[in-house]
Amino acid sequence: MTKELKEQLIKRLKSFAWRIGCYITVAGIALIVDNLTLFNISPELTTVIALIAGEITKFVNTYSESK
């Protein structure tokens, strides 16, 4: 495996980790809120929020690495 391929793989794995971490966080928040019956968040909305949060954290991660 070439060095460039390894670097690309590592970047993709980090991106995946960020996205899955955000999804788990938002799903956990939705579960807590649902159990408290404060809001009624559908699984579809949870998924959309998780994807948006993933993109935001990806942007923050990318921006912080460039400094």
Image (cartoon, helix red, strand yellow):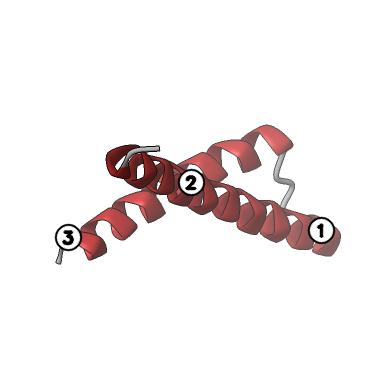
Q: Where is residue 14 in the image (x, y as percent from the top left)?
A: 45, 51
Nearer to us of marks 3 and 1 is 3
> Viewed as shown, does residue 45 lie left or right of 10?
right
Spatial distance from mark 2 to mark 3, Cα to Cα? Answer: 18 Å
- The residue indicated by pointer 2 is 13
- The residue indicated by pointer 3 is 66
Nearer to us of marks 1 and 2 is 2
**Relative to the observer, which residue lies in front, 35 or 62?**
62
Amino acid marked by disc 2? Leu
**Which is nearer the N-term, disc 3 or disc 1?**
1
**Secondary structure under the numbered disc 2 in the rendered image:** helix
- The residue indicated by pointer 1 is 37
**Relative to the observer, which residue lies in front, 65 or 35?**
65
Q: Where is residue 15 in the image (x, y as percent from the top left)?
A: 44, 46
> Viewed as shown, does residue 17 lie left or right of 3?
right
Quadrant where the C terminus is found in the figure: bottom left
**Secondary structure under the numbered disc 1 in the rendered image:** loop
The residue sitting at 46% across, 47% down in the picture is 54
Amino acid marked by disc 1? Thr
Q: Do the residues labelled 2 and 3 touch (CB within 8 Å)?
A: no
Most extreme residue toward the front, as rendered? 1
**Which is nearer the N-term, disc 2 or disc 3?**
2
The residue sitting at 68% across, 60% down in the picture is 29
Most extreme residue toward the top, as rendered? 44
Q: Can residue 38 be seen in this view?
A: no
Most extreme residue toward the left, as rendered? 67
Amino acid marked by disc 3? Ser
